[in-house]
Image (spheres, rainbow, N blue to C red):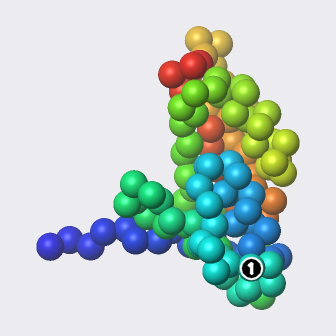
């Protein structure tokens, strides 16, 4: 049998709990009950059984563009509304690749600088 993806890990120089909290609020999934501020790691489980997101403190900062990133698709909001919500939670706009026909994506960065993309959802 082939392996499955169990965890997607994010390195961070700040508090893993804080970065986990950003992603928890963005994705609407809770942090593990035993995660606390100051812990060396924090985790968000996927209730549908998909990969967990793990946030781990490392000593070195991010120095280059991510070689892998998440592409998110809004479910009940427009891409624009979801981008604004992400920015309100602490994300930073990196680049808007929205095409005139509405296709494309918006690249954002989380509070640690990890890039992710917001695609167009069913609501636009």
Q: Pointer 1: residues within 10 angstroms few (<14), some, or many (20+)?
A: some
| Residue 85 in the image: above or below residue 9 | above
Residue picked out by circle 1: 36
Q: Quadrant of residue 106?
A: top right
Residue 97 appears in the picture as rendered: no
Residue 103 lies, in percent from the top left, at: 56, 21
Classify the position of the C terminus by image quarter: top right
- Residue in view at x 51 percent, y 22 percent: 122
Residue 35 lies, in percent from the top left, at: 67, 78
Residue 81 lies, in percent from the top left, at: 73, 27
Q: Nearer the viewer, residue 3 or 45?
A: 45
- Residue in view at x 62 percent, y 38 percent: 118
| Residue 124 in the image: above or below residue 68 | above
Residue 72 lies, in percent from the top left, at: 56, 42
Residue 112 appears in the picture as rendered: yes
| Residue 24 in the image: above or below residue 53 | above
Disc 1 element: loop
């Amino acid at each position: 049998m082939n392996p499955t993806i169990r965890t997607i890990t994010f390195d961070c120089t700040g508090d893993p709990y804080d970065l986990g909290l950003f992603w928890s609020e963005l994705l609407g999934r809770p942090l593990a009950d035993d995660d606390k501020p100051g812990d060396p790691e924090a985790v968000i489980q996927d209730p549908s059984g998909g990969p967990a997101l793990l946030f781990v403190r490392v000593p070195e900062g991010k120095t280059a563009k991510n070689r892998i990133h998440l592409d998110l698709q809004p479910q009940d909001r427009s891409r624009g509304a979801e981008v604004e919500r992400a920015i309100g939670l602490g994300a930073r706009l990196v680049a808007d690749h929205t095409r005139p026909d509405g296709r494309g994506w918006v690249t954002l960065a989380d509070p640690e600088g990890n890039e992710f993309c917001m695609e167009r959802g069913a609501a636009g």
